[in-house]
Image (spheres, rainbow, N blue to C red):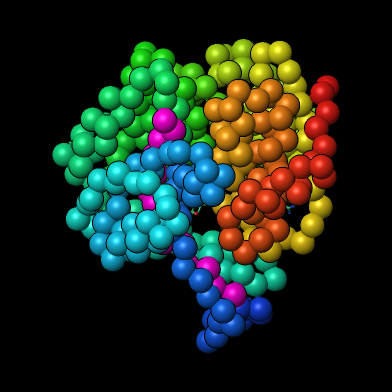
Amino acid sequence: MIYTVTLNPALDYFVAAPSIQVGSLNRATSDQKEPGGKGINVSTVLTSLQASNVALGFIGGFTGEFIQSSLKQRGVRTDFIRIKEDTRLNVKVKSEVETEINGVSPTITISELNQLTGQLTQLNKQDIVVLSGSVPSALEPEIYQKWIATLRKREVNVFLDTSGLPLTYAIQEKPTFIKPNHHELSELVGQEIHSIEDAIAPAKQLVEQGIQYVMVTFAGDGALFVSENVTLLATAPTGQLINSIGAGDSTVAGFIYGYQKNWSLHDCFQFAIAAGSATAFSANLAQKQDIESLLEKTYIRQV
Ligand SMILES: Nc1ncnc2c1ncn2[C@@H]1O[C@H](COP(=O)(O)OP(=O)(O)O)[C@@H](O)[C@H]1O
Ligand SMILES: O=P(O)(O)OC[C@H]1O[C@](O)(COP(=O)(O)O)[C@@H](O)[C@@H]1O
């Protein structure tokens, strides 16, 4: 079974305001509320691809209720731990450019954390775990590292998509897969990465350190995939950018979709990038038919 873990879910509040005047009253032309957070988005895309999965994590309050009921409507299986405080609310403003304000994370008690740790320690080598998104400030940044150590001993494949200190710590335990975007990779390796070519050497080093698969995304400028035996470059399809929120999560879901079907790494990567772009080109997260129609415009080459 595939389990996604979202420690820090969010009610994503999308608001369109064509021209924002800072310091003035602005009125939105449209808005939309979506269940969000990186693992939850991975679960939503996997579910729409009909890949069985369970979303784990913490939810609480009215925002948590909204997430739970929206996911239920979409057929996403969940087994969340209930917490006392409200799940955060993340504001995504669509104007000439996209601006995001991610809310403050709720408190998580030791007993709530222990419940989630208990769920993870029951998994075994048939399972895939996706650890995705930021770590709430109430928890230690080493949390993913500790879980990965336990999960890898049980031969569970761990897909990791996080940033900052949690990523720096977590890679020491060699997750199966990481997906930094180029800003996150720059921060991780302490070196400016502007192009796919710049990312090749640091990604190869991460693979040499024991991470099996490293995928680095560059939004509309393509992506890089490195494993022990292959280095692949992707050209992202061109199209009208409607919403890039959740595009990275869609690439993770797309890769896992192929991986659990034992596709070649080439095909997993191609499907991942098509899934990211399918989300970028629509108001909602990627749907299967949109991903499939972008596959032929997603070029992969080996270097
Ligand atoms: N402007 C765009 N045009 C085409 N595809 C895009 C665009 N922005 C994002 N994508 C797709 O989404 C994927 C992830 O985007 P990126 O912004 O790098 O991830 P993250 O959301 O993690 O920062 C890209 O690899 C690409 O497939
Ligand atoms: O946990 P973080 O890093 O604050 O990110 C949470 C935000 O990222 C998202 O999961 C989108 O992520 P991507 O655009 O990277 O795919 C939103 O749904 C959510 O608001």
Q: Is residue 3 magenta?
A: yes
| Main SS of residues in magenta | strand
Percent across and percent down for residue 54 are 38, 40
Place residue 2 in its image quadrant: top left
Q: Which residues are magenta?
A: 1-16
Picture quadrant of residue 69: bottom left
Q: Is residue 65 left or right of residue 10?
A: left
Residue at point 70%, 71% (across, down) = 96
Residue 59 sits above or below residue 131 on the image:
below
Q: Nearer the viewer, residue 15 or 201?
A: 15
Q: Is residue 228 left or right of residue 132?
A: right
Q: The C terminus appears in which quarter of the rendering?
A: top right
Can residue 241 be seen in the rendering of this structure? yes
> Does residue 262 appear left or right of residue 41 in this picture?
right
The quarter of the picture where the N terminus appears is top left
Q: Residue 55 occupies which quadrant of the picture?
A: top left
Count of all numbered marks drawn on residues in the image: 0
What residue is rendered at 45% in x and 38% in y? 52
Q: Please give the name of the residue rendered at 65% of the width and 72% of the height, measured from the top-left corner.
A: 95
